[in-house]
Amino acid sequence: MVAGYDRPLHELFLQVFCYRKNLPTGEDEIIYDSLHEPALDWTVIGTLTGKLDALGIEVPANLIEAVYLDQRFTAGNIVVWHHANHSPAEI
């Protein structure tokens, strides 16, 4: 799963992938992409959290906070792994 704030578009995004070993290309299968639902208001963090809930995906609270703060302070261009059992790690 990838979520974040897109500075040029001024909106949040969400992509959910599933690795499918049996795909001919060996690539991940896209399960959800927020670009396919442009009618939703992706400027609101509640849209992101609501979609995660609807998909049954639990994420660490610090991920939601980090995405919100990126949006609030127009940050970006960082990659952070958020783990359920320990602190996030910036790459």
Image (cartoon, rainbow, N blue to C red):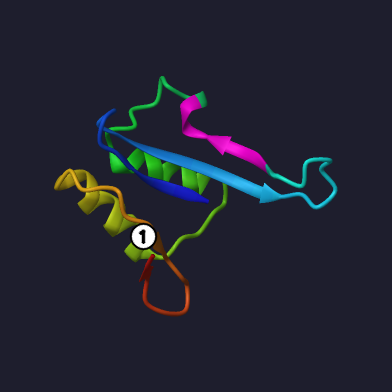
Give the answer, above or below, for where 57 lies relative to 34: below
Asked whether residue 56 is drawn in magenta, I would say: no
The structure residue drawn at horizontal position 20% and vertical position 48%, both measured from the top left corner, is 75
In the image as oriented, which residue stretches furthest toward the bottom?
86
The structure residue drawn at horizontal position 39% and vertical position 42%, both measured from the top left corner, is 48
Give the answer, above or below, for where 44 lies relative to 52: above
The answer to which of 24 and 53 lies nearer the viewer is 24
Quadrant containing the C terminus is bottom left
- Type of residue at label 1? Leu
Looking at the rendering, the stretch of residues picked out in magenta corresponds to: 29-35
The structure residue drawn at horizontal position 39% and vertical position 26%, both measured from the top left corner, is 40
The answer to which of 78 and 9 lies nearer the viewer is 78
Dot 1: what SS? helix
Q: Quadrant of residue 42?
A: top left
Give the answer, above or below, for where 6 lies relative to 64: above
> Percent position (x, y) of residue 89?
38, 71
> Percent position (x, y) of residue 41?
33, 28
Are there few (<14), some (14-19), or many (20+) residues within 10 Å of tag 1? some
The answer to which of 83 and 89 lies nearer the viewer is 89
* Majority secondary structure of magenta residues: strand
> Percent position (x, y) of residue 36?
52, 25
Relative placement, left or right, of 49 versus 76 is right
Residue indicated by mark 1 = 63
In the image as oriented, which residue stretches furthest toward the top?
39
Relative placement, left or right, of 75 versus 18 is left
The structure residue drawn at horizontal position 17% and vertical position 43%, both measured from the top left corner, is 74
